Amino acid sequence: MEKELQPIKLIKNTFFNEKETKESLAKFILNADVLSMGQQCRDFEINFSQYYERNFTTFVNSGSSANLALIQSLINLGKLKKGDEVAFSAVTWSTNVMPLIQLGLIPKPIDVDLRTLNVSSNNLKSILSKTKPRAFFITNLLGFCDDIDEISEICNQENIILIEDNCESFGSEYRGKLLGNFGLASTFSFFVGHHLSAIEGGAVCCDNEELNDMLALVRAHGWDRNLSTEKQKTIREKYQIEPFYDKYSFYDLGYNLRPNEINGFLANKQLEFAEDIIKIRNRNFLHYDHVVKENNSFLPFSFEHMDLVSNFAYPIICKTKDVFNYYVDKFISNGVEIRPIVGGNMLAQPFYKKYNSENVLLPNADAIHQLGFYFPNNPTLTDNEIDRIIKLLK
């Protein structure tokens, strides 16, 4: 009897170096006095800032919360106001767009380039000929980017706030710079399937102290407990808060988006393996890409402009619907887990249609939505599993 193939999952392990990580986590929990947000979370904010060469990191409980906290903070600071137009990458995740709708902003989709899956400067210029958004929330999709340096320059010239969703591109580099370092701020996810797994977790990175302080308020109910003693004194004096009420005064709109010490411990532990994780993901990506380029059933990608692709999962865009159906069936029947490319075209999603009736033509986002899928690239894939996937691509 033929041996049944073991499935190849998008998320194969909870952590990189899973046995060591779980053992160290168990010891930490047994010896920890506090498991709510504390020293491990503060240490991670310092460590991640150093790794990403940013001045500040605000650790939160998910990448989606990072997006929400960033948009709310910009509103609280008066950088954005209700009714402002905010552009976004048309192919992205739902919770990049939802905070815009939830907080009274007007979302404006920008189509992407099929060669890079990302918004290019030409895509941005196209929308600027019709409208001028106050901000642009760009998504660095699946480890890729387009000419984001040109996009940053255009935003500077046009006084557009550029912020980056870098949840899927941790470690990718473009022209000597890590993706996530081209805008005012960037968001990250440490969900179990992402580059660094804290099971759940997210972060906002920036260099602006005022924004960082507001993020700390927004993360925890709008109170000041995570500000420095000096800043607490200043804000309490400004609002004439009596000492009895100082820990229970709320200074601006906020939420409870706090992580816990388990998330912090895991994020610190996985950050130790960051270079290995990035190296393996890039190696797998290059193996896949070599085979994909030899199959004319797929549209080719362009990443030669990048220094390093820290790929989240490998995407395929088929040339026809018949080819798409063929390969979807082929991968599934051979036990390889596949999914649509992120959230596809956001305008095709039910929530977007409910709250926004604007009809916008996005041919490339449509093609990705209808003809695309991605398959596993995680750092614990075996050589045998990679060979199985490569055979399916031929």
Image (spheres, rainbow, N blue to C red):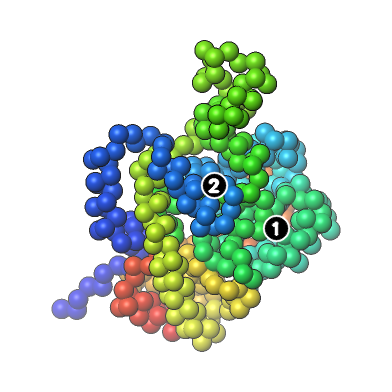
Task: List x then y, in percent, for residue 184.
Answer: 67, 50
Q: Is residue 268 left or right of residue 30?
A: right
Which quadrant is home to the C terminus?
Answer: bottom left
Query: Which badge, 1 or 2, comes first in the chain's sequence?
Result: 2
**Can residue 95 be seen from the camera position used here?**
no
Q: Is residue 25 left or right of residue 61?
A: left
The residue singled out by tag 1 in the image is: 110
Task: List x then y, in percent, for residue 384.
Answer: 30, 78
Circle 2: residue type: Thr
Q: Is residue 201 above or below residue 310?
A: above
Q: Is residue 34 above or below residue 189?
A: above
Per the image, label 2 sits on a secondary structure element best described as strand
Q: Quadrant of residue 348?
A: bottom right
Which residue is at a point 55% across and 33% down the rendered structure image? Answer: 228
Numbered-mark total? 2
Which residue is at a point 58% across and 79% down the rendered structure image? Answer: 300
Task: List x then y, in percent, for residue 1.
Answer: 15, 78
Per the image, label 1 sits on a secondary structure element best described as strand
Q: Is residue 318 left or right of residue 391?
A: right
Q: Is residue 308 left or right of residue 133?
A: left
Viewer-nearest residue: 115 or 227: 227
Circle 1: residue type: Ile
Residue depth check, mark 1 versus mark 2: number of the one nearer the observer? 2
